[in-house]
Image (cartoon, rainbow, N blue to C red):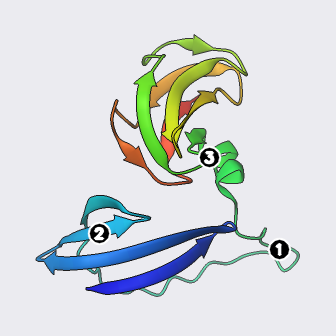
Amino acid sequence: MKSFKYTINGNIYKVVIDRIIDNIADVEVNGTPYKVEMNKPTQKQVITVNRPAQTTLPPIARPQQAAALNSALCSPLPGIILHIDCKVGDTVKKGQKLMVLEAMKMENAINADRDGVVKEIKVNNGDSVLEGADLVIIE
């Protein structure tokens, strides 16, 4: 058993890896158990990208910034999905409640961050999610 302490976006996570069998790991994050399927390592490849000299890369994106780039609405904190109030194909308005996330014994409404159409729902009722996990794709 190995124990780690991570700080992600200012939040502290205590991660305990109980055991690993093949590519499945039994992991606890802040006391919540998970079964994690690990990808097999791929061969490393070197890719050369030609960029204009004046191009500067932005700093690492926070989950909210990443959501704007890939049209995914991300979980603002770790928790459990209690219920989903939208379905694929629904037209949603900014601020409309899409689902409820339970975190630290409190129910948190997850609202649409923009107008659009729900293209995909990435979670189900009862799913445990970590901060930054994709919840809904809105286009």
Q: Which mark is residue 56?
A: 1
Which residue appears at 48% of the width and 16% of the height? 85
Q: Which residue is under mark 2?
A: 27
Q: Where is residue 117 in the image (x, y as percent from the top left)?
A: 57, 19
Query: Label 1 crowding class (10 Å Cα cut-off): few <14, some 14-19, many 20+?
Result: few
Q: Position of residue 68 (x, y in %)?
A: 69, 43
In the image: residue 18, left or right of residue 103? left
* Residue 51 location, quadrant: bottom right
Badge nearest the viewer, 3 or 1 = 3
Three-letter residue code for mark 2: Val
Three-letter residue code for mark 1: Thr
Q: Residue 22 carries which label?
A: none
In the image: residue 113, left or right of residue 76? right
Q: Considering the numbered disc 3 on the image, is that residue within a helix, a strand or a loop?
A: loop
Real-space CA distance between mark 1 and mark 2, rounded to the nearest whole angstrom: 38 Å
Q: Which mark is residue 76?
A: 3
